[in-house]
Image (cartoon, helix red, strand yellow):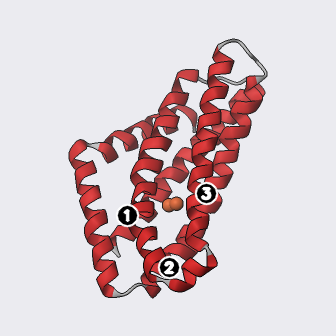
Amino acid sequence: MKSIEIMENEHENIRRMLKVVREFSHRVMVGGEFDLEDMPKIIDFIRVYADKHHHGKEEDILFKTMNEKIHKLREAGSITGMYIEHDLGRLYMQELEMAIEAYKEGKDKARLDIIANAVGYTNLLERHIQKENMAMYKFAEKMLEDEDKNYIEEEAGKIEKEAENKGLQEKYINILEKLESKYL
Ligand SMILES: [Fe+2]
Ligand SMILES: [Fe+2]
């Protein structure tokens, strides 16, 4: 399915940002060079590209359809697990934002919360992406009827197009590349 190929590609871009986040966190830990003003850019990428755009397609289209149409998965709670992990990711971002504010106010111990939430997020998302690539997306390809696959292709395609018209993908890949060249 083309929509799944695109989502796997988005996973790779998200993973690239996770590497930046780990490097940034390490610099916070060892007192290396980091620009605090890059954090809002990272959080924006995670909230808009990874969460609103990518998780949005999963939650509203792909996983929603799988939950409705694949009884085995629904009964096992597999899809619910994915939603819970998306939520946990949002919590990490909220806490990270608060930690950055505290650090800016001069609370040096807020470094701990920056590192804990940033690295916690990367670990969560790495495992989450692996589960989706290895299991959830494979289940979709194997277990959904053609009619449902067509529906997903069409709906995800619309979102992709709308985002493209707004230049969303381009904007966030650009942010990603700039941060990679600065930190990696
Ligand atoms: Fe997901
Ligand atoms: Fe995903």
Q: Is residue 171 visible?
A: yes
Determine the residue positioned at 28% across, 57% down: 159
Label of residue 6 in the image: 1
Mark 3 crowdedness (10 Å alpha carbons): few <14, some 14-19, many ≥20: some
User: Residue 139 at x, y = what percent?
Assistant: 50, 81
Furthest residue to the left?
Answer: 165
How far apart in space, not on screen, are marks 1 and 3 (Cα)? 21 Å
Identify which residue, 97 or 28, lies in the foreground.
97
Mark 2 crowdedness (10 Å alpha carbons): few <14, some 14-19, many ≥20: few
User: Residue 172 at x, y = what percent?
Assistant: 39, 41
> Mark 3 near ligand 1 (CB under 8 Å)?
yes
Q: Are marks 1 and 2 in contact (CB under 8 Å)?
A: no
Query: Could you tell me which secondary element the residue under label 2 belongs to?
Result: helix
What residue is shown with label 2?
Answer: 138
Determine the residue positioned at 53% across, 70% down: 133
Kindly report which numbered mark, 1 or 3, lies closer to the viewer in this rendering. Answer: 3
Determine the residue positioned at 59% across, 36% down: 94
What residue is shown with label 3?
Answer: 85
Identify which residue, 17 or 168, lies in the foreground.
168
